[in-house]
Image (cartoon, rainbow, N blue to C red):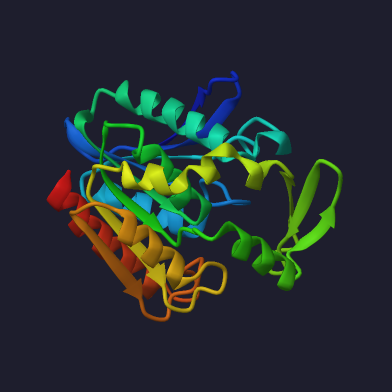
Amino acid sequence: MQKKISFKNNKSYILKGVLHLPEGDGPFPAVIVQHGLKGDHERPLVKFLSGELEKAGFVVLRFSLSGHKPSGGSYQDVLISQFLKDLKAGLDFLLKVKEVDKKRIGLIGHSMGAFNALMFASQEKKIKALAPIGSYWDIGRLIKSFQDKGKVSEINRDYFVLFSRGTGQKFKVTVKHFEDKVYSKKEELIKAINCPALVIYGSQDDTVYLDDSKMIYDLLKHPKKLKVIKGGDHLFIKSKKYQQQIFKEVLSWFKKYL
């Protein structure tokens, strides 16, 4: 069963999303699934993983972050430090759901959402298993990638605009985003993660690089696993088989560690 939900974050913005509840009374293990930059909780990979995890007996929460419609906030809130507060609000919401086993909570993130998930897991002991998908590491290289591919359509004094050639959509980001203090602490924060982590990367990803996933993997403690999805691009939407492979890996990981 799926139902639309909303909750407030630390700034009293309304964050909107969907709660997935499996059949039965529970308690069930639960997973939060996070989208990437410019995305939302309706992105194909996020929806697919959430729906399949629900069928497999997990409560799942997917929601849109601050500054990402349909949630509240503006481009000035598109900051990793703010997203971590959004995740805390999401976790607090999930812990109030009666069907949830409070001791068995996992976290999935894609792209920027994967980086958020890593940073959040480093400071939140309630996260017992983690699966970052296509996370970036080298921020400078990521910015250059945006510029080289013409994805930056406008640069202003306090914001820049990311442009998607595929959809024609534009997304405004504060120039302070890549100056966020969380980025400067990323290495020590990843080293502080104590839960099992499954790092996933698509071999045809042209947005982030395998080196990024390897760097993250090397910093993580055991138990950990690095899985490369052969043929998978950054969004994993060229073929449904890539999403199915990711789900198979994630399900096995969470069944083992949640």
Decide: is 77 above or below 112. above
The quarter of the image holding the C terminus is top left
Residue lying at 33% horizontally and 32% vertically, measured from the top left: 124
Decide: is 216 above or below 194. below
Residue lying at 58% horizontally and 57% vertically, measured from the top left: 139
Q: Position of residue 244 (x, y in %)?
A: 32, 68
Front-lying residue, 116 or 171: 116
Q: Is residue 60 left or right of residue 194?
A: right
Residue lying at 59% horizontally and 51% vertically, measured from the top left: 37
The quarter of the image holding the N terminus is top left
Residue lying at 38% horizontally and 54% vertically, measured from the top left: 132
Q: Position of residue 41 (x, y in %)?
A: 51, 46
Front-lying residue, 19 or 106: 106
Residue 32 image-quadrant placement: top left
Viewer can see residue 204: yes
Front-lying residue, 206 or 216: 216
Residue 218 image-quadrant placement: bottom left
